[in-house]
Amino acid sequence: MKIHEKYIEALKTIDNFVSVSEWAIKVGEIYPDLLEKANIEAQKQKNDTTGVREIAARISSQVPKYELDGVIEVDKTERPKKVKYITKEEFEENTKEDLEEDLEPLNRRDIEKHSEDKMALKELYRLDEFRNIQKAFKTFFNLDFELDHAKALLNKQDAGEHHPDNFQFILKYHNVKKSNNNWERFSIDEQISYIKKCVELQNLIADRMELSVDENILNSLLNRLKQIY
């Protein structure tokens, strides 16, 4: 068995995502001969290193190839990145899901454009005002609210409509968690409470961000939101 194959065999014994360092430690546990050889090579290095570090460096250099070959899944949302062994079937399923995610923005935009083409003037005004308020929160409070569809446009069981009655503001983090699930839309009171809580958090670090929280602007935006919600 080749060395890179032993690396993969070691990873197969771990069920969850692990860092490259943890992977290297597992390689040393299962293949002590590789660790011994790496320790000897490490002693010859001018820089301060160990056998485990040498193995980790070699694995790290192979991660892009392993990912391309479809034998590992890489979670890059954390630092350091984490990896997990996957089967051929899991790789094919992940590839299918990735394709669907890549096409989602196009599908969503097609739905939105089709709906906007049929909107009455009043609904177009509400849509435009939602977007203007969204931009204002970014400009004056550095808050990246996303204009979310409470009933998701791409929900496979019960798709929502692209219509102001289905809009709400939520932070990107919450929208990612929501994904294509359907949530009950905020009432106007809940929406205002949500926004105020977000502003409160910004207020805690306003000085560090050189941000001035203006209550008059906030109240003006909330009043505008009440008119179109």
Image (cartoon, rainbow, N blue to C red):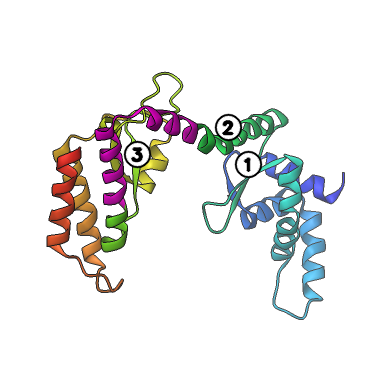
Amino acid carrying label 1: it is Ile
**Residue drawn at x 39%, y 19% as measured from the top left:** 158
The mark found on residue 131 in the picture is none
Q: Is residue 120 magenta?
A: yes
1 vs 2, front mark: 2
The relative height of residue 69 versus residue 151 in the rendered view (above or below) is below
Amino acid carrying label 2: it is Glu
Which numbered disc, 3 or 2, marks the residue that appears first in the sequence? 2
The mark found on residue 148 in the picture is 3
Q: Which residue is mark 2?
A: 100
Q: Does 59 sit left or right of 103 as displayed? A: right
Residue 63, horizontal then vertical, whole percent:
71, 52
Residue 200, horizontal then vertical, whole percent:
19, 58
Q: Which residue is mark 1?
A: 14
Magenta span? 108-134
The relative height of residue 196 versus residue 115 in the rendered view (above or below) is below
3 vs 1, front mark: 3
Camera-side residue of 133 and 64: 133
**Residue drawn at x 63%, y 30% as measured from the top left:** 96
Q: Secondary structure at mark 1?
A: loop
Q: Is residue 214 magenta?
A: no
**Residue drawn at x 13%, y 48% as measured from the top left:** 223
Q: Residues within 10 Å of mark 1 (few under 14, many from 20)?
A: some
